[in-house]
Amino acid sequence: MDNLAVLSLLALAPILVVGVLLAGFRWPAKYAMPVGYVVAVVVALTVWQMDFAGVLAASLEGLIVAGTMLYIVFGALLLLATLSAGGAMSAIRAGFNNISPDRRIQAIIIGWLFGSFIEGASGFGTPAAVVAPLLLAMGFPAMAAVMVGLVIQSTPVSFGAIGTPILIGVNQGLGGDPAVAERINVLGLTMPEYVNSIGFQVAAIHAIVGLLIPLMMVCMLTGFFGPDRRFRDGLAVWPFAIYASLAMTVPSILTARFLGPEFPSLFGGLIGLALVMLTSSRGFLMPKDTFDFGPRSAWSERWMGTLDPTKAVDTSFHMSPLRAWAPYILMGSLLVASRAIPELKTFLTGLAMPVTDILGTGISTGIQPFYLPGFVLILASVFAFVLHRMKRQEILRAVKVSAGQLAGTAVALLFAVPLVRILIQSGPELNSSGLSSMPVTLAEGAAAVSGGSWPLIAPWIGALGAFVAGSNTVSNLTFSQFQFSTGAQIGVPPELVVAAQAVGGAGGNPISIHNIVAASATVGLLGREGDLLRQTIFVTTYYCLAGGIVAFLFIHGLGMNLGTVMLALLLTAIALTIRWMLKQTPPPAASHTGIRADKS
């Protein structure tokens, strides 16, 4: 056990170094990831005794995988920048102007539903970058707008950017592991079918855990930013919040089951948005009282940013809603067609560029440039160029903006993914020490310590990866094989442990420093990262606790076990929290507070 403990710590060293540099010394990822990569190379060469060709081949494999990720990210950023430069995003935002004046309802519809759709289409932190300025322009305090944008970067994140955390993160994280191939053969599945099944399990856990996220968001909104700081004001709209949650998660889980991991957040957010907007216009489950933040003069200075709210949204463009949404509609249609029509799927996947036996090591990978979502996203952008009659300067500005945003993450990814591939490829096939790969060694150590309780812990590892890297995709790339191996070690279905990892990686996004800084910058809120972290930590804590419990119960069921005990404790804590909220003193009718009676 002592030797295993030492090896486990050495296997964890590259990730620990990155975590300390990012969280402890506040280094940017573009500096921390190269250092972590160097540590991984040193450990692989000296302790695991990989030969130099194996390390170089794993690094080249990582660069190719990183290139596919950057291809998708560029397409997502280009589409968003195109819609912004051409005026479509302003038209989409203007379409929300007739929403209820109640700030709780606005936060749920724009943050939870529209934000989930943007997450599904773009991912990589773009929902907060879109939602926060929109809410700011509608009269939200800057910090409240950012908090809403961060909280919703939880449930839909596992299927963000057309399913990248599953299709790239989990798929590439598990790829090349003989144990995974053996498990797939036992189940009688192909690798894509196996990844899709994990995606469905992820969606199922999210549907249960995410049920309370919209309600938690509005309770935080009224408790932290309401004039009376009362969480019960958010609790008052619980029927609408639960309804809006189900409006997104039910289509999401059905989409994951029948279409695959590309679409749950995209279609879940879009269907939920259309449904809730329609029913809200008819007064369904709308609150009788209206909540507002109170007079701006009474707001705390710490809530305010440097951006002028009246300039947060450009309303100079005039475009019909259908024309504004058309590129997104085209994108969704093409993605569905390319995944659902067998002949088209076969044709597109056949236009692949395989890279086999890199440097004679047996490591192989490949690129499917016309099947990857990046191709569809770029096509949708070109369609928007024409449909929105964009000028040459606008097109160039969109390309320049998206390329500039891509450059900010490229360096980190170009070192992070090779780091992960070195860890994964460090097994006995490419080393002379006879040691299992670093993730498997970590799994053996974790299994020895935790035993059968590991599914309760798995989401916290995913959250740690997201906190460190600022990405669910990178977290899954880093830890999927580790989680799979741990599940196999303790004798439970390893795919459910991987699903818990993916759920935890999504739940860790609200506390990612990278996401907090990026979202804050969109509303001119700088230097308040600590305040936001202290708010969003509640979401991550709940998500990891609940996600671990649900995964454990999926494996073992209800009964005399630790998962059932943890479920009882969590439900008790939620009940006590609700009771405490309800005891908060209500305001006098028609007072100066943010709650006012509906005149109707």
Image: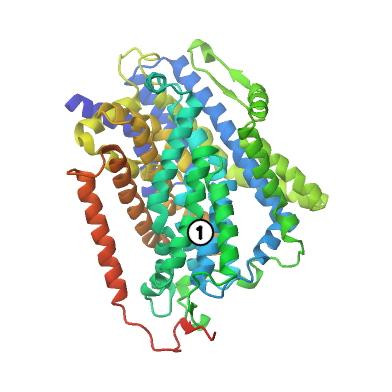
- The residue where tag 1 is placed is 112
Q: Quadrant of residue 533?
A: bottom left
Choose between 127 and 202: the one closer to the eye: 202
Q: Quadrant of residue 311?
A: bottom right
- Residue at image coords 79%, 53%: 388
Q: Quadrant of residue 529?
A: bottom left
Location of residue 139 in the rendering, given as x and y in whole percent from the top left corner: 57, 73
Horizontal side of 530 relative to 79 (left or right) equals left
Choose between 10 and 94: the one closer to the eye: 94
Location of residue 217 in the rendering, given as x and y in whole percent from the top left corner: 43, 63
- Residue at image coords 31%, 78%: 584
Please tell me whether residue 240 is drawn above or below residue 80 in the rendered image: below
* Quadrant occupied by the C terminus: bottom right
Query: Would you call the spot at circle 1 few (<14 residues within 10 Å), some (14-19), or many (20 or more)?
Result: many
- Residue at image coords 27%, 64%: 575
Q: How many numbered badges does the structure rendering display? A: 1
Location of residue 54 in the rendering, given as x and y in whole percent from the top left corner: 45, 16
* Quadrant occupied by the N terminus: top left
